[in-house]
Image (tube, helix red, strand yellow):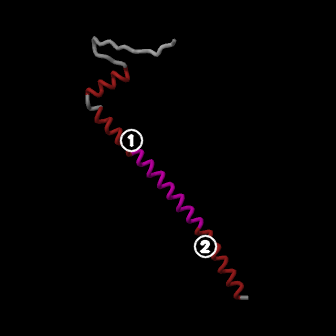
Amino acid sequence: MKDKFFLIFIIGSFIFLLFWGIKSYLKVNQAKNRVKKLEEKLEELRIENETLKKEEENLKNPFYIEKLAREKLGLAKEGEIIYKILPGGD
C-alpha cells in the first residue's frame, strides 16, 4: 500500500515538475523575444540619433541652410528667377 502511494507521489511530482518546467521555459523564451525586440528598437534609435546629430551639424553651416531654403521652400536670392517645370498634360 505504501509503495502505491509512493509511486503515485513520485509520478504526481514528476508531472508537476514537468508542467512547471515547460511553463518556466515558455516564460524565459518570451523574455528572450522581448529582449531581442528591444535590442532591435535600440539599434533603430541609435541610427536615428546619429542621423539627427549629422543634421544638427549640417544646420550649423549657413550654406546648408541656404540649400534647404532653396530646395524645400523655393526661395531665391534677389534677382534670381526660379523656373518650375510642370508635367505635361497631353
Residue 71 point in image, percent of width and height:
36, 23
Which structural element holds mark 1? helix
Q: Secondary structure at mark 2?
A: helix
Snapshot quadrant of residue 48: top left
Q: Is residue 12 magenta?
A: no
Give the residue at the far front of this rendering: 90
> Taken as a whole, is the magenta stretch helix, strand or loop?
helix
Tag 2: amino acid: Leu
Q: Residue furthest right?
A: 1
| Residue 80 vertical placement versus 54 (above, below) | above
Please state the horizontal and vertical placement of residue 1, each as a whole percent of the image: 73, 88
Q: Which residue is mark 1?
A: 48
- Is 28 colored magenta in this rendering? yes
Label 1 environment density (alpha carbons within 10 Å; few <14, some 14–19, many ≥20): few
Q: Quadrant of residue 83?
A: top left
The residue pinned by badge 2 equals 17
Q: What whole-number distance in Å separates the C-alpha atoms at marks 1 and 2?
A: 46 Å
Nearer to me, 63 or 2: 63
Left or right position of 79 against 9: left
Find the magenta span and give its range: 22-45
Q: Earlier in the sequence, mark 1 or mark 2?
A: 2
Residue at 70% in and 87% down: 3
Position in image of residue 63 (x %, y %):
26, 26
* Residue type pointed to by label 1: Glu
Picture coordinates of residue 2 (x, y %)?
70, 88
- Classify 36 as above or below 49: below
